[in-house]
Image (spheres, coloured by chain):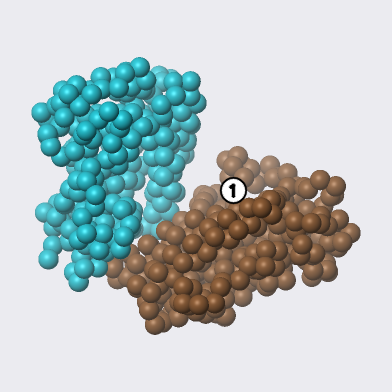
Chain colours: A brown, B cyan
Amino acid sequence: MKPTVYHIPVCPFCQRLEILLSLKGRRDAVDFRVVDVTRPRPEWLLEKTRGTTSLPILEIDGGRIVKESLVILQYLDDLFPERPVAQREPYRRAVENMLTRMEAEFCARGYAWVMNQDPGRRAAFEEAVLERYGELNDFLLEHSPSDPFLFEAFGWAETVFTPLFARFWFLEYYEDFRLPAGPRYTRVRRWVDACLAHPAAQQATKEEIVKVYYDYAKGAGNGALLPGRRRSSFTLEPDWRARPWPPRDKYAHSATDRELGL
Amino acid sequence: MKPTVYHIPVCPFCQRLEILLSLKGRRDAVDFRVVDVTRPRPEWLLEKTRGTTSLPILEIDGGRIVKESLVILQYLDDLFPERPVAQREPYRRAVENMLTRMEAEFCARGYAWVMNQDPGRRAAFEEAVLERYGELNDFLLEHSPSDPFLFEAFGWAETVFTPLFARFWFLEYYEDFRLPAGPRYTRVRRWVDACLAHPAAQQATKEEIVKVYYDYAKGAGNGALLPGRRRSSFTLEPDWRARPWPPRDKYAHSATDRELGL
């Protein structure tokens, strides 16, 4: 049996795994199966996850389950040791591990902002997100002032962060967020741009992310249903390509299923 | 220059590094320097940490700094590759990494409880801590039902958790916490007992932890000074050996410097 990843649609944590495998030229070595999170979890999946609903999970031989995207990422990097993505030299590895430790808070701040429903709190959410970008800027200036990437090439840290940079297109669309011009964010902006342009990291487009994450922008995560709606924007049908771009003004307007093409 | 760790007294994150080095027979390869957290950070240290106050940090050749205990732990395991502590086989490594992912919440729950000052909330704090022990029990039952340790010997996961099990002696002393008898905690109790008994993990005694952490039990962390007190229990002088055992009843009584032998 091929190792199989079960994940929610357009999941950033799952995209990390796809990027890593692409960098190794082994994308086909793992099956990826989307779980419809707008329906109750099927019994066969709950058995695999032992009752928890967190995704992605990786299933390997003998029904063994690996959880947590960074743990799965390391597992796949070890399982296919040719073209290692993680650094091998101890100090370089420590540097990318320190950067990796910043991903949880970076992710949490961006998701908290997109889910915010109180226009009076927008400025505070923006500030918290900018603080995290500023931290990344400082870190890169210290450890890699000139390269676009942390080291010579797109590697482990880029694999971890790029799916988040792409998800944050929902902030650009629904919150009109842009990294401000000026020296505070120059280094991190170069990094973000280089990451998003890399050929191994093209699994999700801005259009797909903006459409699928509409319900997050209205405060409903993980396929939960909003009042007055019959379908989640996370539904697998109709396909996102067949839907119109959602209205951008999340604070003043709640789109209907019909407006969203659902 | 020898790699040098700067840390606060009786710090569990620093003890992880000492355990790892002891397992490798390389305890002498790294210098450990205690920082007096009851005084303002000295300038030379703030320069090393670039203004942050988090400890421990590791300084290596050229003034390079590695932060975050788990990152330092991996660095030292890579730097001294003989007798590796982390698993090398990809799936076993993933298993210990999944267990390691549970340490942050485990630590946070225990520290939150010891710092609680409201007797009405004790039951809720205890429940949250027990829930974490229950999770560890489940994990061990699934991946290692019979051995005392996760694998054949005291390894990475034990290095990560043992200093926390030892710190939680402050819950035993100040909150009268015990793992309840009965099957829910049988497996994790065997693990905790085997971890605490291991010869590589004897850096801190119950007496030292209970005395030094008195101020945590009264709600003051990291060397902060409590009302009416002139010295923190984290002070380096007088030495903890010269002090009496603190009063156990944290909710009804606030000990003076004199009662604490400070």
Looking at the image, residue B136 sits to the left or right of residue A19; the answer is left
Write down the residue under mark 1.
Answer: A54
Does B168 sit left or right of A163 as displayed?
Answer: left
Q: Position of residue B198 (x, y in %)?
A: 22, 37
Q: Can you say whether A208 is above or below B108 in the image? A: below
**Location of residue B196 in the rendering, given as x and y in whole percent from the top left corner:** 25, 34
Residue A156 sits in quarter: bottom left
Mark yes or no: residue A174 visible: yes
Depicted A155 relative to depicted A35: above or below: below
Using a 10 Å C-alpha cutoff, classify the residue at mark 1 as few (fewer than 14 neighbours), some (14 to 19) or many (20 or more). Answer: few
**Picture layout, residue B144 above or below residue B87:** above
**Does residue B102 lie above or below A121 as drawn?**
above
Q: Residue at the location (16% across, 29% down)?
A: B262
Task: Give whichever of A185, B14 is nearer the camera.
Answer: A185
Residue drawn where x is 58% and y is 56% of the image: A125
In which chain is the residue bearing label 1?
A
Left/right of residue A1 with respect to residue A87 in the rendered view: right
